[in-house]
């Protein structure tokens, strides 16, 4: 124990001395630069989206996000050095840059570079080809020109992979991955090899498609110059080690952002079904709307056509009505003229026998019977609707004409028309009514006023409460004897009054005599209907 | 009282003849008969009657209204239209022609006398 005690102070002193020497030596050694906060590290940057690339001039991608996080944690500043893949590998080997992202780990490379302990991403090589080229298996590549990046691990790995199947290809070397796609697009290569993640991005911008040929899964790390002189790999490993476990570390978020962006926005199946249903309903509504619009358009066209046809038909109808009016008016005029010619012929013929007063009298009687017909046609010719004439004007003018035409002017006969109401008569009512008036007036003018200096005739026409019409006639002449049989008289005049009034007009004729002679003719309403 | 002189212008011969007889029986002197507008214009200016009894519808290119205008323009005798075209339109056209009167057929000869005598007196 004492020996032990004796020995212990000595041993302690030696150990302390050794520690002091080592401490001095350690202090004299240069300290790793990366360990110093504020140190700027040079980082190689090349186009390999989504792992490493520039997005609108800004360094971006999975490896860059992870590296920026590490730099922030460790207090580094990063300076990016753009270059081609093969050129940057050379720069890394020479120590011209401190870090190169997304470098596949192989034993051969491990002899030249150092790598971070943990890979950031596992990727593999894939063959891409033009959209018009049919490549399904590696055997389809026999004798083909295959583009690959100079110095790329995948270019070498693909050659070995193809040779293992006995496939001989002509490798076309280009400087970077976009150049691989461009070579396919230009036809300088039949296919090209590219890392899967990067090729998938590039396939969106070039006319290429991915093939099922996949090879050489490989872990991608940050690579540093051999010996890790800046301790960059060690620093990154330290940050990785300190990352929290679970699914929401900075690394996980970067991975979701660049590699599986859709994973955070997964749409549930029911929502997809609802959206599909809504889409279908929308499509059906659009289809229905289009169909309805088409139907409306067709119907509108049909209606326009129908309206145009009706307008044309209306115009034609108006023209025809106007023509009918003109023709009818001309017909009335010609009938009136013809009647006038007939009357003139009768009177001229009668005047050839001046010594036969009976003949002249007959001529005047016939002329008087034509007068109502003549007058009706004259008034119809002047009327607006060519169907109706005024009862007041017609009966007044007719009575005046009969008075004017009489030959025996020994008595001054006054005509009273106050009882004439204004009603519109149709031709089928006016003519027979005029004939009745003519017979009654002719009778009065011949027999009512013998030996008298004057007399009076009153006529009236009006409507009864029943709707029937009543024509009234009266003279203040000598009248007829008591018990005079009006219906039994042989004279044509009274026979005509009864025949026309009751037989033709379906009315009722009544005579009375006290004083003078009076006659009433009741005509049923609606006796005749308009013909034109 | 002298007999009034009339020129009868009528293209319907029977009606013209009957009117002539009516006028004669009432003491008129019918100095001429015409059936066209041209003839009416010529006879009116040549015969210078007291009145021209003018039908409106006449044979030939010139109707009674145009003939009446010609007579008036040439300083001829007054014109009385005697027509069966007694609608409003025809009356309006005739009024522009400066006629003395517009009578519907058959003509009331007694009324015609009063009309012409009044015009001559005035």
Image (cartoon, rainbow, N blue to C red):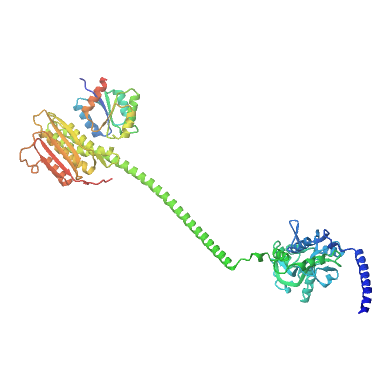
Q: Is residue A296 left or right of residue A364?
A: right
- Does residue A119 sit above or below A499 in this rendering? below
The residue at the far front in this view is: A2
Left or right side of A377 for A30: right
Furthest residue toward left: A482
The quadrant of the image that shows the N terminus of chain B is top left
Q: Nearer the viewer, residue B61 or A413?
A: A413
Answer above or below: position of A382 versus B72: below
For the residue pair A121 and A179, the one nearer the viewer reads as: A121
Check the picture and name the quadrant holding the C terminus of chain B.
top left
Front residue of this view, candidates B108 and A461: A461
Quarter of the image holding residue A94?
Answer: bottom right
**Can residue A192 be seen by looking at this rendering?**
no
- Above or below — where is A32 with respect to A506? below
Q: Left or right: A18 with respect to B87? A: right
Q: Position of residue A141 (x, y in %)?
A: 74, 72
Q: Nearer the viewer, residue A243 or B9?
A: A243
* Quarter of the image where one finds residue A491: top left
Task: List x then y, in percent, for residue A359.
Answer: 13, 35
On the image, the x and y values in percent for residue B51 come to 27, 25
Quadrant assignment, res A502: top left
Total number of numbered discs in the rendering: 0
Residue A176 percent coordinates (x, y): 78, 63
Whether residue A2 is visible? yes
Q: Residue at x 45, y 55 (%)?
A: A299
């Amino acid at each position: 124990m004492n020996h032990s005690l004796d020995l212990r102070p000595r041993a302690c002193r030696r150990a302390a001395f050794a520690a002091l020497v080592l401490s001095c030596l350690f202090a004299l050694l240069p300290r790793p630069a990366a360990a110093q906060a504020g140190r700027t590290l040079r980082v190689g940057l090349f186009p390999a989206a989504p792992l490493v690339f520039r997005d609108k001039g800004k360094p971006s991608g999975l490896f860059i996000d992870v590296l920026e996080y590490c730099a922030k944690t460790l207090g580094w500043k990063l300076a990016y050095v753009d270059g081609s893949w093969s050129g940057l590998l050379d720069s890394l080997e020479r120590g011209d840059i401190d870090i190169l992202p997304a470098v596949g780990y192989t034993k051969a490379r491990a002899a030249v570079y150092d790598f971070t302990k943990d890979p950031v991403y596992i990727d593999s090589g894939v063959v891409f080809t033009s959209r018009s080229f049919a490549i399904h298996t590696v055997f389809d590549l026999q004798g083909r020109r295959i583009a690959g990046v100079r110095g790329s691990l995948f270019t070498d790995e693909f050659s070995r992979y193809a040779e293992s199947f006995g496939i001989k290809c002509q490798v076309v070397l280009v400087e970077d991955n976009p150049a691989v796609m461009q070579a396919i697009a230009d036809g300088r290569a039949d296919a090209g090899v590219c890392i899967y993640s990067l090729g998938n991005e590039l396939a969106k911008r070039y006319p290429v498609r991915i093939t099922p040929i996949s090879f050489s899964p490989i872990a991608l790390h940050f690579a540093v110059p051999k010996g890790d002189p800046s301790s960059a790999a060690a620093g990154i490993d330290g940050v990785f080690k300190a990352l929290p476990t679970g699914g929401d570390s900075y690394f996980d978020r970067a991975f979701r952002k660049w590699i599986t962006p859709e994973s955070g926005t997964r749409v549930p199946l029911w929502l997809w079904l609802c959206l599909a249903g809504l889409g279908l309903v929308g499509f059906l509504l659009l289809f229905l709307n289009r169909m309805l619009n088409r139907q409306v358009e067709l119907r509108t066209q049909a209606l326009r056509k129908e309206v145009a046809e009706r307008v044309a038909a209306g115009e034609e109808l108006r023209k025809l009505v106007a023509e009918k009016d003109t023709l009818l008016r001309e017909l009335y005029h010609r009938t009136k003229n013809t009647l006038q010619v007939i009357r003139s012929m009768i009177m001229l013929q009668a005047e050839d026998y001046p010594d036969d007063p009976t003949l002249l009298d007959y001529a005047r009687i016939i002329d008087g019977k034509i007068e109502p017909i003549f007058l009706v046609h004259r008034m119809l010719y002047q009327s607006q609707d060519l169907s109706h004439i005024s009862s007041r004007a017609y009966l007044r003018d007719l009575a005046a004409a009969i008075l004017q035409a009489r030959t025996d002017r020994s008595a001054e006969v006054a005509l009273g028309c106050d009882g004439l109401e204004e009603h519109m008569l149709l031709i089928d009512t006016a003519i027979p009514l005029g004939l009745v008036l003519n017979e009654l007036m002719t009778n009065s003018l011949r027999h009512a006023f013998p030996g008298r200096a004057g007399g009076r005739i009153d006529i009236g026409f009006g409507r009864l409460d029943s709707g029937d019409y009543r024509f009234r006639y009266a003279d203040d002449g000598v009248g007829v004897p008591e018990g005079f049989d009006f219906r039994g008289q042989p004279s044509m005049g009274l026979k005509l009054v009864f025949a026309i009034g009751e037989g033709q007009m379906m009315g009722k004729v009544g005579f009375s005599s006290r004083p003078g002679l009076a006659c009433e003719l009741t005509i049923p309403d609606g006796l005749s209907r308009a013909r034109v | 009282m002298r007999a009034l002189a009339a020129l009868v212008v009528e293209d319907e011969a029977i009606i013209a003849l009957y009117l002539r007889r009516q006028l004669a029986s009432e003491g008129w002197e019918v100095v001429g008969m015409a059936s066209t507008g041209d003839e009416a214009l010529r006879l009116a200016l040549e015969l210078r009657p007291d009145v021209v009894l003018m039908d409106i519808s006449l044979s030939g290119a010139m109707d009674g209204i145009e003939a009446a205008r010609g007579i008036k323009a040439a300083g001829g005798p007054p014109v009385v239209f005697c027509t069966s075209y007694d609608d409003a339109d025809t009356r309006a056209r005739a009024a522009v022609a400066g006629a003395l009167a517009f009578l519907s057929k058959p003509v009331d000869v007694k009324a015609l006398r009063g009309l012409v005598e009044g015009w001559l007196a005035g």
